[in-house]
Amino acid sequence: MKEKRRFFQFAFSLDLSYLNYELKIIKKIKEKENTSMEVTAEDLGKRSFCEAVMRARLPKAVFKELKKTIDYGAPLDAAIADSVAIAMREWAKELGATHYTHWFHPLTNLTAEKHDSFMDPVGDGTFITEFTGKELIKAEPDGSSFPSGGIRETCAARGYTVWDCTSPAFVKEIPDGCKVLCIPTIFISYTGESLDHKTPLLRSMDAVNKQALRILKLFGKTPAKVTASVGPEQEYFLIDKDKFNQRLDLKLTGRTLFGAPAPKGQELDDQYFGVIKDKVSHFMRELNKDLWEYGIPAKTQHNEVAPSQHEIAPIYGTTNVATDQNQLLMETLKKVAERNGFACLLHEKPFAGVNGSGKHNNWSISTSDGENLIDPGKEPEKNLQFQVFLAAILESVDNHAALLRLSASSAGNDHRLGANEAPPAIISAYLGDQLADVVDQIIANGEATSSLKGKVYKSGCSVIPEFKMDATDRNRTSPFAFTGNKFEFRMVASSMSIAGANTVLNATVADVLQSMADRMEKTDDLDKTVDEIIYETLKEHQKVIFNGNGYSDEWIAEAEKRGLPNVKTMVDATASLLYPKTIEMFERQHVYTKTELESRAEINYEAYAKAINIEAKTMIHMASKEYIPAIISYVTSLGDSINSISAACAEADLSVQKDLLTTCSSLLAKAQTALYALKDADKKANAMEEGKEQAEFFRDTVFTAMADLRAPIDELEMIVDKEYWPVPSYGDMLFEV
């Protein structure tokens, strides 16, 4: 017995020793992690095959030729691809990459990748490291397994991904620790149509470059290239991962399909720019490090309006690179959140009654000489070149308002737009006092002779320095707001690719610039024609300018008088893809073909229907399997309580218990009736043929039935004992991070 005791004491001491050893190791790892969280200049872009890496690793002649393609759109010489592939492979292997993939943007708002090993079998049981120019340039994923809108059938599966050399390749680590070289590409069908967001975006960049250069030439300027640039502001929520996993609706749909409001929301305006919590700060620090290594430095990060809501804004980039980086940013947000015990919510409206999330798209166009074409300068009244580009932008917004609305449309964003927390569904442009005054002068007199200037701020405090204020305010209620030297398209959905919005902006502006350039090139009196174009364009399209409160009922009425469309849902907006003027414009600019537009309309209707269908089925499951059984348990406990108290004391006042029992039973019956109605509506919807009619049925009938089911269950959440409630509440999720 003594020997046994000694043995266990010895074993226990070994366990303690081993535990102490483990704790020391963990401490060292944590210390190492903390130091490795520091961001250094050397880390910037270390996972990106960026210009500095290419300059160092490529032969000078190869680098020079590749730069011509990247900077000026010169045709890519396939002969240099082998040299680039070798350098890219060796660089990626040094970072630990064992596989490569063509990384592309199918019509899902997500990215896609198929990993191929660098190792190829020789035939004698050995392998060689292989990655050639052919593999760099082209791959063949299944073109029928992604949304195609009828372009591809299951029996016609071939598709191609083709290298976009203007966007840097990068190495990322996937969950199993494997590192993969990701090569940005376009994605097209065997018959040549675009199956992705990237191809039309690149085409639109070519279009705005071509037409802007024509305008600039008439003003005596000859830059090599004009580039559309964008800086997207990404909003998101962070909630506890364990609580996220308890909510089937969040896991399957991205938003809460049930949920009563918390006692406190955002009423006190104390979240926006508030002190960042320690856990969130650590998350942001780790996020910044990962993004820094990808070559995506964040310019701004802060708490947003709603509890547990945040925003990050990377620096500007060309629209295709910024689009790639935003997709990588969203992926990185989720990965880093997971590592830190959070779930990152990118849905536009994850919580009812709480501000949703958007993605403000700050768009501008600049020359290779560094001139911002949307910068009015110190004297906008004299800057005719700026006035031409401003007029072109306003005309494009007015002519294609519904199309611009569609570019920001999703089933999720329908919950947000027009809800006095985000831009209204009516497209208008905010110019501010200074430019609005210039426009008014031009319309009234044919020219502007002055512009408003910013005042000097004097605080009245001797220690506070004076400074010159801006000549105009900002307007957060405008969907398309001028903000000094760019336009902020505020409607874009937080979970969406920014490719669609920027494709529309680039293409529509290019189309107006083309008509202007055609007219200017034919005239014998350029100065007179420029003045006429500015005057006529501003006068005809001034109705799209609105500097007031976009949330007001008065603006809705005023917009209707002006003839501005109020497109309330994604389903309504999709029709704009097939307007004759839309098809003509896109084909004229070589951005979309008619076939591609028809396919995207079909995809939109299907995507909307499928999103609402998933939500409906999730509601049916949660109501049947979680909420109603939990409520029945609570009601049963009330009945048992009434019976037991009555048996113990017949004179006891049971009015409270009986009132609760009556109320809960009544709401439970309403929930059950609504559940049957939703099941029936969803069944009818699924029996319909896919397309516009089905999407409209989901919008009008199924969505309404979903709201009818939610109402009694949310009311019951305010009554039923928390012990019985099956899922975390809004308060649990929004205030326990």
Image (cartoon, rainbow, N blue to C red):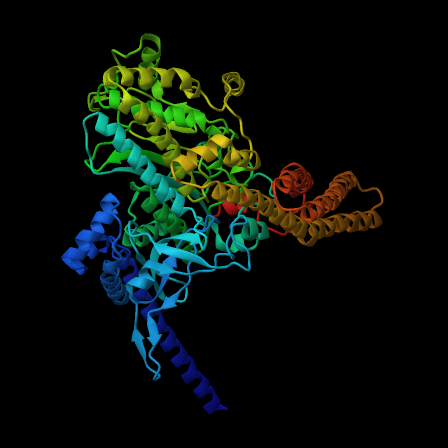
Q: Is residue 457 visible?
A: no
Q: Is residue 338 left or right of residue 729?
A: left
Q: In this view of the protein, which residue sits in the foreground, 453 or 225?
A: 225
Horizontal side of 111 relative to 301 (left or right) equals: right
Residue at 35% from the left image edge and 8% from the top image edge: 444
> x%, y% of residue 251?
54, 53
Q: Residue furthest left?
A: 60
- How many labels, in total? 0
Image: 115 above or below 185: below
Q: Nearer the viewer, residue 369 or 474?
A: 369
Residue 366 x/y as whole percent: 26, 34
Q: Is residue 658 left or right of residue 553?
A: right
Name the residue nearer the viewer: 310 or 281: 310
Q: Is residue 102 visible?
A: yes
Q: Residue furthest top?
A: 445
| x then y, percent, for residue 240 | 48, 52
Q: Quadrant of residue 256?
A: top right
* Residue at left offset 23%, top offset 45%: 71
In this view, 470 is above or below 236: above
Residue 293, quarter of the rendered image: bottom left
From the viewer's perspective, is 444 left or right of 593?
A: left
Q: Work out whether 103 lies above or below 392.
A: below
Q: Is residue 482 above or below residue 243?
A: above
